[in-house]
Amino acid sequence: MQKRVVHFEDGNQEMKWLLGGKGANLAEMTRAGLPVPPGYTITTEACRQYLDKGELPDGLLDEIISAMQELERKKGQQFGDPSNPLLVSVRSGSVNSMPGMMDTILNLGLNDANVHGLAQITNNERFAYDCYRRLIQMFGNVVCNVESYHFERLLLEQKKAKGVELDQDLTADDLKQLIIEYQDVFERMAKQPFPQDVKEQLRLAVEAVFRSWNNQRAIIYRRINQIPDDQGTAVNIQSMVFGNLGLDSGTGVLFTRNPATGEDHLYGEFLTNAQGEDVVAGIRTPRTISELNDEMPEIYRALHTMAKKLEAHYQDVQDIEFTIEKGQLYMLQTRNAKRTAQAAVKTAVDLVKEGVITREEAIMRLDESHLNQLMHPTIDTTEPLTQIALGLPASPGAASGQVVFDADTAELWASKQNGKVILVRTETTPEDIHGVFATQGILTSRGGMTSHAAVVARGMGKPCVCGCESILVDENQKVMRIGEQEVKEGDWISIDGATGKVYAGKVVVKDATFSSELTELISWADKIRRLKVFANADYPQDAAKARELGAEGIGLCRTEHMFFGADRLPVVQAMILADDQAARDEALKQLLPMQQADFEGIFEAMDGLPVTIRLLDPPLHEFLPHMDELDAEYAELVGAGQELSREAARIRMVMKKVRALQETNPMLGQRGCRLGILFPEIYDMQIKAIFFAVKNSLAKSIKVIPQIMIPLVGHVNELKFFRERIDRIAEQILGEATEQSRYVIGTMIEVPRAALTADQIVPYADFFSFGTNDLTQMTFGYSRDDAEGKFLSHYVEHKLLPNNPFQVLDRDGVGQLIEMAVNKAKTHKPNMKSGVCGEHGGDKESIIYCHQIGLDYVSCSPYRVPLARIAAAQAKILEG
Amino acid sequence: MQKRVVHFEDGNQEMKWLLGGKGANLAEMTRAGLPVPPGYTITTEACRQYLDKGELPDGLLDEIISAMQELERKKGQQFGDPSNPLLVSVRSGSVNSMPGMMDTILNLGLNDANVHGLAQITNNERFAYDCYRRLIQMFGNVVCNVESYHFERLLLEQKKAKGVELDQDLTADDLKQLIIEYQDVFERMAKQPFPQDVKEQLRLAVEAVFRSWNNQRAIIYRRINQIPDDQGTAVNIQSMVFGNLGLDSGTGVLFTRNPATGEDHLYGEFLTNAQGEDVVAGIRTPRTISELNDEMPEIYRALHTMAKKLEAHYQDVQDIEFTIEKGQLYMLQTRNAKRTAQAAVKTAVDLVKEGVITREEAIMRLDESHLNQLMHPTIDTTEPLTQIALGLPASPGAASGQVVFDADTAELWASKQNGKVILVRTETTPEDIHGVFATQGILTSRGGMTSHAAVVARGMGKPCVCGCESILVDENQKVMRIGEQEVKEGDWISIDGATGKVYAGKVVVKDATFSSELTELISWADKIRRLKVFANADYPQDAAKARELGAEGIGLCRTEHMFFGADRLPVVQAMILADDQAARDEALKQLLPMQQADFEGIFEAMDGLPVTIRLLDPPLHEFLPHMDELDAEYAELVGAGQELSREAARIRMVMKKVRALQETNPMLGQRGCRLGILFPEIYDMQIKAIFFAVKNSLAKSIKVIPQIMIPLVGHVNELKFFRERIDRIAEQILGEATEQSRYVIGTMIEVPRAALTADQIVPYADFFSFGTNDLTQMTFGYSRDDAEGKFLSHYVEHKLLPNNPFQVLDRDGVGQLIEMAVNKAKTHKPNMKSGVCGEHGGDKESIIYCHQIGLDYVSCSPYRVPLARIAAAQAKILEG
């Protein structure tokens, strides 16, 4: 059988699953030769046995006692000895950090008999009784569920009675009297006297810590943080040291480097003649660590040496708790220091330069939140904030601005008055696009993470909060209401797109800080990664931005976004509303040069890099006005007696078309290549625009690498149909330059059937691009628009799903389809390229998965390109 | 190289792909020793070579000429001989029957020189010139595209000029003159003279037949009938025989058994001294075949012998064309006879009893259209009919009735006046259910094959025509408009749910005829098949019907349908609209005994057989009124100044709820087990109702086999969640009877992810039921409601898809998922049962596939159970 009790010197960092995080850490520190007060850990396995059985498993108590005897030998003290008692702390320590559920009992081993001995040996009677008082309170609280306030009340009364303000002003005698009252209340509430048998104290404490695994707050914490319920907690028994035994004693906290800036100097604070809780209590003001150099230079030097040693050992900046007991330094805890994004990046790069860690290790330490902080403005949360609502964190970044409720006003205020505005809408539509360009950020009351507002904002790198349902937006009255509160046009608000929070008024926004260290770190990542990183970009300026952020090509250019420009939408609508082929052709003829110009712009921006152009995807009704709007317009005309007017007739005609195009499930309707098959003239126009643009670009010596992509293919015949058409049009337009243009034709794999029949499709495809958004929707049978607002959060919260599959790619289901398709494709065409262009292309875990299954690239929004470059390198590093 | 010209005696039935249907048939008849006029076939391969090359392939003409020489030897005549010319027919003959595109030239080999010879040798000058006249016309038409009317006009003028009425009254001289005019018009229109070289005639005729493969009507025919374009047609060259050479000659058509009833006697008609086209022309009335016995008893005996010989050879009833030339009997064609469903079934059973075919062969001959005819009333199409519209054939059967536009009137007229009504609606909703019960049939102007009306009608075996878009239904004015035509309440119409046709007025409806032979045939099928056949039934009376039609259990009981009863819907709505848990619980408490009673009824009806109950599946908004209706009701109240009334407040509340429940893509939204997870109390009520019903049924000694089925599972955790809940409730209600109840728990596999992760799901499932409707929707990414009206027919018509995947299961995609799931399931639980309960469970091809991949059962609507029993046997037989 595995050992269920492990001395610190017998454990190490690798045994975290058995010893818990804290236990493993104490063991590791001990192993590293640091002065850690000796002790031992009761394993998580012992806890699981206890929880299974409902009582201590056979023999465990003997093992604990035997370990205690070993500890007695090390300390030269006896547990329960009346004259020189060995005191210990008992602390829970789970595998994953669970702050707030950690149960701690200090000073265990004191009783009525040996408290005198402690007083004598420390020559500090007050200290001894204070220790005992604290033990009774903590023991009562942790072991017997006696609420702390019962004890606190007695303490308060005692101080009143004695006319003193602070705990430390109570004398030893005051404390002795208080201990009697503490023991009374203990017995009354716990239905048993405070145990005088120290072994009994120990047994009860260990069991209580075991049981605490299943208390309410622990269960909730685990649910929120997705920690398995069957892990159990370890228990750490450690000999006590005291920082309050005189002026040669003390306690402190230390960072081995500055956690805000990353600069390489000791950072922290300390108090002499104090215990840890005194620092927390805030009664005395701690002093900065540099002052320790003046006061106890030897200790400071020892600390400095240990700091470097610890950094070297843990290969990271450490956050250390230490205690000095009568001139003897003890390390109580060390852990990797929490730090700002800026510090994290600087430290990682510095540690590489110092030779402490490798470039790979530095890269592994960078995470998404760091990059989000460094690449987007953030709100300074140290300033006071008034949160008024919470929505979905749809696009990171933060902004303050004056509220406007329509795109025209947004544009006007932003341009003429050079003002900062936040566009607030129920939801945005393509017709709001000029307003979105003009704003600092967007706030909508409806729509999810894939709503128009969200997608557009992410593309532009602007902050956006979506689906903020507590807000009622009245666009006519130009006011938004949150409960009783009203925010009018022109009022200031602030939004944080990384958290979904909405604040009243202006806030302090900290700029993005794309430091030289970050640039260096990403350049290292580029050398390591195998996956290419492309960007999703629909306009020339986005393409330029993407390239600036390191994109190696455009993986998805959504041509429909080009249709939404103010100058184009009317033409697009005319095309859709056309009664006959001639009228449709006329509209398409107008659209062609516009699309062509867009493509030329993108080709120029991406000179020498591939540009993947997806043909029209959304259902046509997305380009027409909403029925509600039409109803309102029509009612107005009727009200004015203009039912017979030409305008009324026009609206009736549009309404008829909108009705004809309405669908029960538009997600699964007439969109993607289905449109191109029913209306080949639309796709033809797009294909012509591409090749005319290719021709012109070639003439300007631009190196174009056009990749035409067909959306929503579910059957090979669809791709076949377009492949023939594209080749024919290319030949017609390019003639002899066809060869030179090096165009390729690929397909989105976003319908499950396409993945399943990839072997049939692959002969007609030069590349596969997995549209994991739609593939996730169809594989799960989840409409993202509906699921995120309705059941998905419930599913994740109640662990029916491990993650939101729209954020983190579902490996078992969706991933299985992707792997199947890739394998089938590679069987036919070993060198065929494939990648992901859904939102998962910008998610770290998903990028790692893409690497693992052998995809060639990921494509994400421009502002996620740096993250993807890092994640791709991390994937490669993880591979080993 | 394969032979490109094959003499009849060298071919056989198996060579259909090479010789075409007609050529293979002539070969087979020759092989069977029947007196077939000799000839040869030019293969489809030769045609393909011709079409590829655009001219006759090298050497082919030589092969044809050489075959002609062989034919000359057999007939003892020379092709082109001036005194005794060999004449031949030239006919196209494709692999698949393509009636209407068959090009035929008779009497080829005649010219100005040898027409005299023919006159002399037949001693019939008029006959000879008539043959020549016909040749010129047919040759002109088939080879040179000279429209027939040019010739017909000349014939008419000639008859006028001669003062005669009938063609046959023209003399030989008249015909000679006409031939001169025919040749003139031929030369003028064809820009070349009529060829006098008979070999040139032959070459041109063969090329023309080859070319006819790509004429417009052939292309369209192939597209409609899904015949590959690259098949090509064969050409049959056969020596002519003449039935018009005197009273010892004649021609006729013969069925070897009565094609209407299946009775075993010769059936047909003949004419003496006539050619085939004379029968068709209708100038002389043919006589029944029995009269031939009086006139030419030897010929009749020979025919009788040949009929039996042919039946034995082809093992089926034959439809024969014969000609008697100067007392010599020739068989021109034989083919399996078209027959009524009744005759088909009787013949199949009789042939088994006569030892001609096996039971397996008899079963293989029964097809879906036969069963539809025998199980449902049909319209007598021999009577005059006025079709006024065409919709989707949503549920087979035919009915006449008076038009009503609402369910209440339907019920009233049907019950009080015992009238026959047809319910006409824009679309039906659950609230119309009492009207549907009362009607003879349903006609809707909107909705597809899975609309409410269609599903309910199929379940009840009533005719239904859906999505009849040319009809404008005005339910308020109680009128429907089709173009200019108006049909008012009370007017009679008729519908044919098998064809989608709508007729004005009453029509003659023939009753269903479930004959003893059919019963016998199906009982044979039951002995053969391996697949079990279950039924989808939601009410006790449907369950009883299903059992009567041979269902071996209920494979799908949709509990939501029970919610739509007039007495239940208000309670269901109250449950959905409940503001708090208490109100919801109250409504559920009322629903419980209702559901329980339903289940008890079904358990009783299915005593001893399994009943699979699916928990609530559709989104809750389906139970609430449509927004349009609410808008209208509310507007009315506002109009009446009752905006502040209690009713107005209620409507506002309902509107709010309807709005909250609205979804962008309801198909992929909050439905199925997602509802059960968000509102466990609803599923709990249903589970309780099941087990209370089980308990009561057990007490009544009914043998219950309840199978509880969870819909829309996509992740194992969902099933796990319900399995625990169901087991707990069963234990609570049944206690010690739990064991005895033998209940099992299964899941629908209808989300692609469920199929992909079947290995994770199977530990918690006792059975899998593939919901192929939804699985098809999600695997293809097709919303059936949208696809069928919008792009699916285009896809099928243009061969982008081989079939409508909602009718015939898609093996490559959807099937792959099913096979994957079955294989994964069987790896874990080799004996686990699985089946299909989508509409594919009633489709022959899909049933055969279900058998092939090892499913255990199919479940279909009660009226398709007999078809499924047959198809399951066919699947087993096909397996060999």
Image (cartoon, coloured by chain):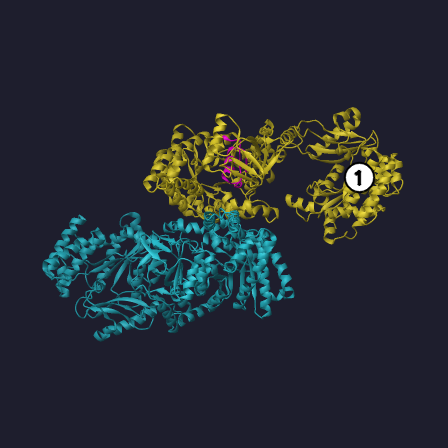
Chain colours: A cyan, B yellow
Three-letter code, disc 1: Pro
In the displayed structure, would residue A474 be above or below residue A359?
above
Q: Position of residue B769 (x, y in %)?
A: 48, 41
Using the rendered image of the protein, determine whether residue A52 is visible from the camera's viewpoint.
Answer: yes
Which residue is painted at 60% across and 60% down in the image?
A: A688
Reading the image, the residue beneath label 1 is B38
Quarter of the image for the C terminus of chain A: give it: bottom left
Q: Position of residue B268 (x, y in %)?
A: 72, 29
Closer to the camera in the image, B648 or A294: B648
Give me the chain letter of mark 1.
Answer: B
Q: Is residue B677 left or right of residue A634?
A: left
Closer to the camera in the image, A366 or B373: B373
Using the rendered image of the protein, determine whether residue B69 is visible from the camera's viewpoint.
Answer: no
Q: State the residue lying farthest toward the top.
A: B294
Q: Position of residue B528 (x, y in %)?
A: 57, 34
In the displayed structure, would residue B266 be above or below residue B219?
above
In the displayed structure, would residue B358 be above or below residue B80?
above
Q: Is residue B444 left or right of residue B299?
A: left
Magenta stretch in the rendered image: B438-465
Quarter of the image for the N terminus of chain A: give it: bottom left
